[in-house]
Amino acid sequence: MPTARFGLSCSVVDGKIYAIGGAVSPTGTPLATVEAYDPATDTWSSKAPMPTARNFLTTSAVNGIIYAIGGDFAQQFTHRIVEAY
């Protein structure tokens, strides 16, 4: 994975694994980073960032759309936002 991080979420669409959000350290700034891994070619690619940076979110893929749900945007502050990616 090009961007090392924790507190991210992953979902699968069209055989690719999308690594979404997270932070680079426990007290770090949340990321809007989205990267996709293609197991067929063993390659990572950068994708357009999420509209809202967050870590400790959850994601779910439904009919080819990834939904980013909740998560933190700063220590002890949480999102009530759901976005389609």
Image: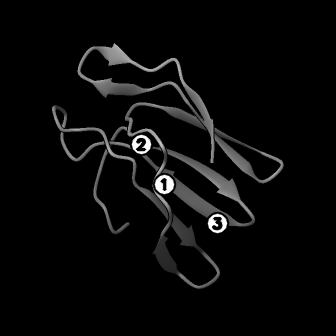
Residue at the spot of label 1: 19
Question: Which residue is at 54% across, 24% downward?
Answer: 81
Q: Amino acid at mark 3?
A: Lys
Residue at the spot of label 3: 16
For this orientation, the residue located farthest to the right is: 63
Task: Look at the picture and state if 3 lies above or below 42.
Answer: above
Residue at the spot of label 2: 8
- Circles 2 and 1: CB atoms closer than 8 Å: yes
Mark closest to the chain's N terminus, 2 or 3: 2
Q: Is residue 46 toward the left or the right of residue 82 in the image?
A: left
Q: CA distance from mark 2 to mark 3?
A: 16 Å
Query: x%, y% of residue 24?
Result: 22, 47
Q: Looking at this view, is 64 or 40 the one in front?
A: 64
Q: Looking at this view, is 4 or 67 the one in front?
A: 67
Find numbered disc 2 in the image and state the secondary structure of the residue it sits on: loop
Q: Looking at this view, is 54 or 40 the one in front?
A: 54
Q: Is residue 68 toward the left or the right of residue 84 in the image?
A: left
Task: Look at the picture and state if 18 lies above or below 32.
Answer: below
Find numbered disc 1 in the image and state the secondary structure of the residue it sits on: strand
Query: x%, y% of residue 31?
Result: 33, 45
